[in-house]
C-alpha cells in the first residue's frame, strides 16, 4: 500500500505497485546492495527472503566471504539463518560493484556515514561509492534506480550523490537513470522483525519512475509506503532519531528529578505513559508557534528552578524554555523581514477557543512590535476586554495596557488596516482568509493554514 504525503507520485505508485507485485515472478527484480554492514546485510537477507535476487558488494573481504558462505558478518538474531537460506537458494550472491550495477535494476547504497571528529557527517564512503556507481552505469537502455539507504542530511543526495552519478555516467538523473532515497529505521538486535513488521516504508523520490521502482522492491512488506520528496525523506530519518534521543533524555531527567524528591521515576513514567490522548500520542507534535498559556511555562520554570536548588541537572527541560524563546524570536524576525510596518495580528489568546491571555506568545509578539513602533491592529473573536477577569486581566493590563486601542472587533477592518497579516491561531472560517487578502499583503503563518486553504502569493510559514 502506498500512503499519503507524496501527492500524485504516491497515488499513481499505488496502482503500479499492485500490478508489479502480481507480476513479480515475471519481472525478477534484481537489487544490488553496496555496503554489507548492519543495514546492508539485513536488507540483503530480508529482500532475498521476499523472493528478490540480491547481489551484495563490500570492500571488506571478511564480510563478503562470510555472506558468500551464508554466515552473518555481524551479531544479529536470526540473520545467520536468513543468510544461509538466501545463499542456498541462490537469491543472494556477492560480486564486484561494476558487475552488481550492470546486473541490477535497483542499486542501494548502504555504506557507513560516521561522524567526523568535528561532529560533521563524514560522507566520504558515500562519495566513493557514488563515483564508482556513476562510472559503472552502462548505457544499455535499461532504467536503473540508485537508492541512498545510508543516513544522510537533507540535501546530501542532491548535492553529493546526484552530480557524482551524472558526472561518472554522462547521463541525467530522473531521465536516463532513477535516483531515490530509502532511509532505514531498523534497530540492531530486532532488525529482521523491524524490516518485516515495519511501521512504514519511506521513499524519497523527485520523479515517479524512481519512486515506483523502489515501491516495487517493498511490494512484499505489509506496511504503508510514504513517497515524499528526497529532502523530506532525508529529514525524516534525522527527525526519528532526534525524537528517540529526546524521549530517552526526557525519561532520564524526569527519573533523576523524581529520585531527588523521593519518588520512583519508573512509577511516574508508567502513569504518564497511560495517557494516550495527550502524552503518548500525536498531540503537541504539529509544528506551530511558541508554547504559552498559564501552565506550561510556569510549571517548566518551577521544576527547573527546584532542580537547580537541589543540584539536579536538567539540561533538556531547561533547554525547552530556551528553545521556546528562540522560536518566539523567529516569529518576530519573520515580521521584521517583510520591511513593512502596519501589522494585523489575528489571534491574541494562547490558543483557539479560549480568552486566556496569560503568557500567550501572541501577546508577547504584540508587545514587542508595539515597542518597536509597528502600527498594530489585533483581531481575536475570543477576546472581549470587558469580560476579562482576575489574573487574566492583570496579565494583559501589565503587558498590553492599551489593548482597547489596538483591538478591533472586525476581521475586515484589521485586514484593511494592515500590510502584514500574522496568523497566530485558527478559527472555523480561517480557510477563507487567503481569499480575503489583497495582492500586496503578506501572510505570516505561525500555526499552519488548514488543509484545503491555498496560501496567498506572498506567504511565509514559520516551519514550512
Ligand atoms: N546500524 C544501524 O542500526 C543503522 C540503522 C539505520 C540506519 N543506519 C545508517 O545506515 C548506514 C550504514 O550503517 P551500518 O551500521 O550498516 O554501517 P557499517 O559500518 O556496519 O557498514 C558499512 C559497510 O559499508 C562498507 N563499505 C564502505 N565503503 C565501501 C565501498 N566503497 N564499497 C563497498 N562497501 C563499502 C564497509 O566495509 C561496511 O561493511 C549509515 O548511514 C547508518 O547511519 C544504521
Image: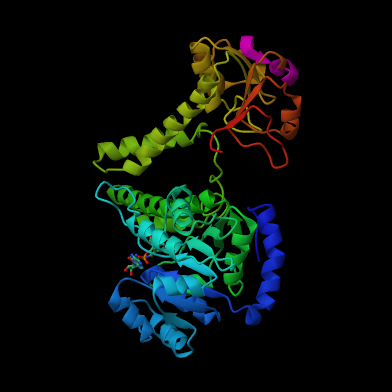
Q: Nearer the viewer, residue 85 or 300?
A: 85
Q: Is residue 410 magenta?
A: yes
- Colour scheme used in the picture? rainbow
Question: In the displayed structure, would residue 368 be above or below residue 212?
Answer: above
Q: Is residue 448 above or below residue 90?
A: above
Is residue 305 placed above or below 22 in the rendered structure? above
Please count the marks in the image: 0
Frontmost residue, 373 versus 341: 341
Quarter of the picture containing the N terminus is: bottom right
Q: Quadrant of ligand 1?
A: bottom left
Give the extent of the magenta segment.
404-415
Can residue 272 be seen here? The reply is no
Q: Is residue 439 above or below residue 272?
A: above
Residue 112 visible in the snapshot: yes
- Residue at point 26%, 43% (across, down): 312
What residue is drawn where x is 50% and y is 80%? 48
Q: Residue at x 45, y 74 (%)?
A: 100
Q: Is residue 2 left or right of residue 199?
A: right
Residue 58 is one of the magenta-drawn residues? no
Quadrant housing residue 444: top right
Find residue 285 and report its horizontal and vertical position in percent. 53, 46
Q: Main secondary structure of the magenta part?
A: helix
Query: Which of the image's four quarters has the C terminus?
Result: top right
Q: Position of residue 132 (x, y in %)?
A: 40, 63
User: Where is residue 157 drawn, in percent x and y?
Assistant: 46, 52
Relative depth, front residue between 389 and 161: 161
- Is residue 182 toward the left or the right of residue 422 in the image? left
Where is residue 104 drawn, in percent x and y?
Answer: 52, 73
Amino acid at each position: 500500500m502506498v500512503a499519503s504525503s507524496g501527492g500524485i507520485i504516491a497515488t499513481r505508485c499505488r496502482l503500479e505497485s499492485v500490478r508489479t507485485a502480481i507480476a513479480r515472478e515475471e519481472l525478477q527484480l534484481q537489487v544490488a546492495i553496496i555496503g554489507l554492514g548492519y543495514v546492508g546485510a539485513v536488507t540483503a537477507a530480508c529482500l532475498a527472503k521476499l523472493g528478490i535476487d540480491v547481489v551484495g558488494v563490500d570492500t571488506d573481504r571478511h564480510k563478503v566471504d562470510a555472506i558468500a558462505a551464508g554466515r552473518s558478518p555481524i551479531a544479529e538474531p536470526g540473520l545467520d539463518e536468513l543468510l544461509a537460506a538466501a545463499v542456498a537458494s541462490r537469491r543472494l550472491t556477492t560480486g564486484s560493484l561494476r558487475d552488481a550495477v550492470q546486473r541490477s535494476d535497483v542499486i542501494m547504497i548502504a555504506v557507513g556515514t560516521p561522524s567526523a571528529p568535528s561532529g560533521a557527517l563524514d560522507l566520504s564512503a558515500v562519495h566513493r561509492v557514488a563515483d564508482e556507481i556513476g562510472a559503472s552505469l552502462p548505457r544499455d537502455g535499461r532504467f536503473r534506480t540508485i537508492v541512498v539507504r545510508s543516513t544522510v542530511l537533507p540535501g546530501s543526495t542532491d548535492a553529493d550523490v546526484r552530480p557524482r552519478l551524472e558526472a561518472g555516467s554522462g547521463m541525467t538523473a530522473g531521465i536516463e537513470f532513477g535516483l531515490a532515497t530509502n532511509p532505514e529505521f531498523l534497530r540492531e538486535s530486532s532488525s529482521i522483525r523491524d524490516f518485516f513488521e515495519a511501521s512504514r516504508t519511506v521513499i524519497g523520490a523527485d520523479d515517479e519512475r524512481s519512486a515506483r521502482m523502489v515501491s516495487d522492491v517493498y511490494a512484499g512488506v505489509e506496511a504503508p509506503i510514504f513517497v515524499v520528496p528526497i529532502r523530506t525523506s532525508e529529514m525524516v530519518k534525522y527527525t526519528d532519531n532526534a525524537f528517540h534521543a529526546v524521549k530517552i533524555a526526557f525519561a532520564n531527567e524526569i527519573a533523576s528529578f523524581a529520585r531527588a524528591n523521593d519518588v520512583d521515576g519508573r512509577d511516574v513514567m508508567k502513569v504518564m505513559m497511560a495517557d494516550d490522548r495527550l502524552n503518548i500520542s500525536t498531540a503537541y507534535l504539529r509544528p506551530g508557534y511558541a508554547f504559552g498559556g498559564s501552565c506550561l511555562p510556569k510549571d517548566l520554570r518551577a521544576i527547573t528552578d527546584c532542580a537547580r536548588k537541589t543540584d539536579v541537572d536538567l539540561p533538556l527541560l531547561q533547554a525547552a524554555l530556551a528553545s521556546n524563546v528562540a522560536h518566539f524570536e523567529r516569529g518576530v524576525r519573520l515580521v521584521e523581514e517583510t520591511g513593512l510596518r502596519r501589522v494585523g495580528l489575528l489571534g491574541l489568546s494562547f490558543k483557539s477557543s479560549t480568552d486566556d491571555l496569560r503568557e500567550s506568545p501572541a501577546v508577547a509578539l504584540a508587545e514587542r512590535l508595539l515597542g518597536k513602533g509597528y502600527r498594530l491592529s489585533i483581531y481575536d473573536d475570543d477576546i472581549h476586554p470587558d469580560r476579562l477577569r482576575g489574573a487574566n486581566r492583570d496579565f494583559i493590563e501589565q503587558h498590553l495596557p492599551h489593548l482597547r486601542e489596538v483591538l478591533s472587533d472586525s476581521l475586515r477592518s484589521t485586514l484593511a488596516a494592515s500590510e502584514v497579516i500574522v496568523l497566530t491561531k485558527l478559527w472555523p472560517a480561517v480557510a477563507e482568509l487567503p481569499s480575503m487578502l489583497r495582492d500586496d499583503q503578506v501572510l505570516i503563518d505561525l500555526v499552519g493554514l488548514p488543509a484545503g486553504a491555498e496560501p496567498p502569493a506572498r506567504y511565509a510559514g514559520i516551519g514550512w
